[in-house]
Image (cartoon, rainbow, N blue to C red):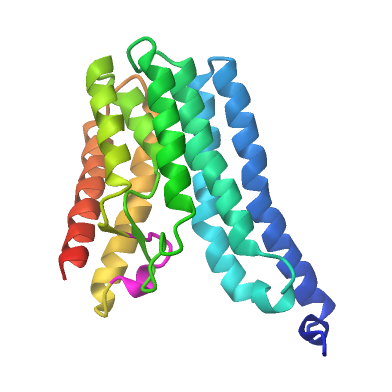
Amino acid sequence: MVNQSSSFSTKQHITAWSVHFFTASGAVFGLFALYAIHQYQFRLAFWLMAATVFIDSVDGVMARRAKVKLVLPNIDGALLDNIIDYQNYVIVPAFFLLISDLLPPTWSFISSSVIMLASAYQFVQCDAKTADHFFKGFPSYWNIVVFYLFFWQFSTWVNLAIILSLAIFVFVPIKYIYPSRMDYLTPKRRWRRLMLAGAILWSMATAGLLWTYPAVNPLFVTISMGYMIIYFLFSLYRTLR
């Protein structure tokens, strides 16, 4: 059997390996985020979490352009991505809840365990990412959830209700938009471009909220929360259709 990867140039192999290295670097940033949380440097931890989200947002596009599946067929990039996603989207924010005081005493242990178990169930579902490139069930964006809880400073019992409700939504088969696969969102190009622009604006506004914290910038709040509402409503619309 001919080794298909041998038909690619050295430059293509280096590029493919570089993409995998870039993806794997997300695990390092996640590790540093855990250490920052342990040191009670919460804002630094969120910046490190933001770095992992950025890596996860662009590495898929890079992988497809570099044709890593063809160039390096013996490396399972999807498995690597899932391992790092579980670390950064589940373990890191669950640990944040254990260390911080966002939840009622003793409930932080229960809530963190619920997050870990519900997300483990979702990650092993064969159709967790649907054939038309949507997430099925709440896509374990726990790092984003924890950021908003930290920012809004709700009561600990309200935070608990939000965490448990979203854990239940993991099992509700709503199709959530895959932000880095907007090409499958709708056949109408203008809507895809608008949602992509909204995602970029959301990331900038949310970074602005963290940068100016504890001050509250109304414009950043409007953009950040407005996009989250649109994201959920559009996801619900696509599910019903």
Q: Is residue 239 above or below residue 203?
A: below
How many numbered marks appear?
0
Judge left or right: residue 12 versus residue 171. right
The reply to whether the magenta stretch includes residue 40 is no
Name the residue: 64% across, 43% down.
27
Judge left or right: residue 238 versus residue 204. left
Name the residue: 59% across, 67% down.
62
**Residue 47 at x, y = what percent?**
51, 33
Depth order, front residue of 199/90: 90
Q: Quadrant of the C terminus?
A: bottom left
Residue lying farthest to the top in this orientation: 105
What span is in magenta? 177-185
Depth order, front residue of 178/80: 80
Q: Quadrant of the N terminus?
A: bottom right
Judge left or right: residue 158 versus residue 176. left
Indicate the quadrant where residue 112 lies. top left
Q: Can I make out residue 143 in this image?
A: no
**Residue 190 at x, y = what percent?**
25, 74
